[in-house]
Image (cartoon, helix red, strand yellow):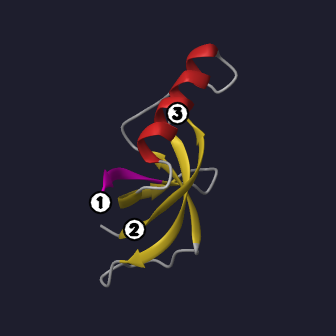
Amino acid sequence: MDIIQGRVFRVIDGDTFDIDVTNIGKKNKFNYHAEERIRFSSINAPEIDTGQGQLDKILLEEILLDKMVEISIQARDTYNRIVGEVKLI
């Protein structure tokens, strides 16, 4: 499984965010960009245009914005986002 690390610089909604990639696993099979959009594999938040969706975005910003994360990559979705497990580091 490929692994990348980086700093969260933008939260899109309650289950998607952007990182500046700062470290790429040495055994990775694929190449990654300097910035990547990440979607949690285990969370499906309400759409951003709902009240709960707005609240979920705010909560995720409080948890992740400007923090370092490690992503264990499972796939890329149809929107070219990385889907994976996210861990604060």
Q: Which amino acid type is shown beneath numbered disc 3?
A: Gly
Question: Which range of residues does the magenta coloring cover?
Answer: 83-89
Q: Are marks 1 and 2 in contact (CB under 8 Å)?
A: yes
Instruction: State the CA–CA distance, disc 1 to disc 2.
Output: 9 Å
Q: Which amino acid type is shown beneath numbered disc 2?
A: Gln
Q: In front: mark 1 or mark 2?
A: 1
| Left or right position of 62 against 27 | right
Q: On the image, which quarter does residue 34 sit in?
A: bottom right
Q: Is residue 68 above or below residue 83?
A: below
Regarding mark 1 in the picture, which secondary structure is present there?
loop
Q: Is residue 18 above or below residue 22?
A: above
Image quarter (top left, top right, bottom left or bottom right) of the N terminus: bottom left
| Left or right position of 65 against 53 | left
Q: Which amino acid type is shown beneath numbered disc 1?
A: Ile
Regarding mark 3 in the picture, which secondary structure is present there?
loop
* x then y, percent, for residue 59: 47, 30
Q: Residue at x 50, y 49 (%)?
A: 65
Find the residue positioned furthest to the right: 49
Q: Residue at x 50, y 79 (%)?
A: 31
Q: Answer with mark 3 or mark 1, whichever residue precedes in sequence.
A: 3
Q: Residues within 10 Å of mark 3 (few under 14, many from 20)?
A: many
Q: Residues within 10 Å of mark 2 (few under 14, many from 20)?
A: many
Label 1: which residue? 89
Q: 46 or 19: which is nearer to us?
A: 19
Label 3: which residue? 14
Q: In front: mark 3 or mark 1?
A: 1
* x then y, percent, for residue 60: 47, 37
Q: Residue at x 65, y 17 (%)?
A: 50
Mark linked to residue 5? 2
